[in-house]
Amino acid sequence: MIQQFDMLIEGKLKPALSGKYFDAVNPSNGEVFARMADADTVDVQTAVSAARLGFDHGRWPQMGLAERGVYLLKIASLIRENAKELADLECASTGKTIKHTTFIDVPSAAETFEYFGHLSGSLISETVKNSSPVLSVVEREPVGVVVTIIPWNYPLIMTAWKLAPALLAGNCVVLKPSPVACASVMLLAKLAIQAGLPKGVLNIITSSRPQAGQELVSSPEVDMVSFTGSSKTGEAVMALASKGVKKLTLELGGKSPNIVFADCDMEAAIGGALSAIFMNQGQMCTAGSRLLVEDKIYQVFIDKLAARAKDLKIGPADSFETEFGPLVSVEHRDHVLKFIEKGRQEGAKLVLGGRIPEGNLKGAYLEPTIFTNVRNTMHIAQEEIFGPVLCVLPFTSADEAVHIANDTKYGLAAMVWSQDLEKANKVARRLRCGTVWINTYGAFLNEVPFGGYKQSGFGRELGLSGFWEYTQIKHIATDQTPGGKPLVCSWF
Ligand code: NAD
């Protein structure tokens, strides 16, 4: 049965004013599984105005942190109660395996709401000692109306990363998921209503129009934009947000190096390298898409890696047997195929995959793909492919590995594999990126900030740093000089 999803505007589920819907397609079989309300300009404006009203006249910004935290905890428990439906929708929308959506996406989203829901109220006000008779209280206040825009690869997790801290800080929010994958987010919208969020505090719109994001970012009623997506769109968002001097955070693309030293635990490093590029079919901002292997183990490492990748079970994402599902859409699969062709033309050697799998699979499938003979100047080594395409490069020394790793416009994440932890830590400190995983991949922790250097963006998600992004700082200075004659401001 095809489900229909409306938008969350002014505290209620509402269709677009035009009554239009657009199709949500399951990339595992190419079939329409849901219809999403299709917002026009007028719906975007209504959502923003609802948030503005909620912030300027509602009680939400005045509530204490603990009171707002209770709503986040309610949302978390509703996510857990509706885990199966959410995991199914996330799987149908994105093509991510049901194993992934069941054991990673849904519980992680709940945990993020729980982490922020439990943050202590003592965080937002502190008395700062100083050398004058002025009592200085520094407070964190909400920014106001926050527009949050997310990509299609992790709809539920990205939603949680943005909504939980933004709402906890007292902002009123308009969220726009990607039209490519948004059904699970609209189920979350229903749960937010059940949790009793006051009217206007959270608005979620869906739209097939590319202009919807631009309209949100350029609205004069908006105070802050928190954007996650590609670096190209991030540049456009930054230009638009400059109008009205909006606060901005950008979480953008990556071309993350995965550095494997000869003294690594080889089985662990192979497992890490596989996960880093083939989990979610490589559609991860932190994909370890450039594998740098020390020359002493280069050939044996590639042979073992390719053998393991060849064995990955490709199939429909909704089977618990499947290890490698489809890409998010046929359009995106074809975009990735163009990169593969470009790699061939540039002289890289295809050692695995590169084709649409044979058989009766109907959907956006592509084989796990590995290129060797890659130079770091090649297009496939420099551009974010956002698919299951691994570029392998050899290195002979730590200096050379660091040079190749940093020779990119991106700076999101990196991995280092070595049993010499002193060496691995030295290398980690020389890498120009926001996260380095040593002897592991993909440790995203609610307590710890995540974000990019260089064209991977600025600002942080998660942790206290992620919370502070959604606040602004006020200093309240009270003169306490005895006798009423102010000492500090006594110029005249
Ligand atoms: P995208 O940039 O095409 O779109 C992201 C979002 O922006 C979507 O909701 C889209 O509808 C909206 N959008 C498009 N044009 C816009 C405009 N001009 N103004 C405002 N909004 C606009 O990215 P995508 O294809 O959905 O996602 C893949 C990208 O996201 C990759 O580059 C990936 O690395 C990145 N990503 C980054 C992180 C991170 O935390 N750094 C996490 C996940 C994904």
Image: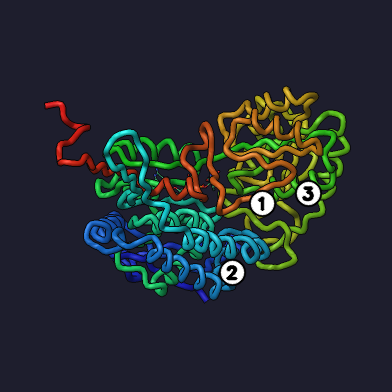
Task: Determine which residue is flagged by label 2.
Answer: 88
Task: Determine which residue is flagged by label 3.
Answer: 271
Give the residue at x 41% y 58%.
121
Mark closer to the chain start, 3 or 2: 2
Q: Which mark is residue 281?
A: 1
Q: Is mark 3 within 8 Å of ligand 1?
A: no
- The answer for how far apart the CA atoms under marks 3 and 2 are is 26 Å
Mark closer to the chain start, 3 or 1: 3
Residue 132 coordinates in the image, percent (x, y): 29, 34
- The answer for how far apart the CA atoms under marks 2 and 1 are is 18 Å
Q: Residues within 10 Å of mark 3 (few under 14, many from 20)?
A: some
Mark closer to the chain start, 2 or 1: 2
Amino acid residing under circle 2: Asp
Describe the element under mark 1 as helix, strand or loop. helix
Give the residue at x 25% y 63%.
58
Q: Which mark is residue 254?
A: none
Amino acid residing under circle 1: Gln
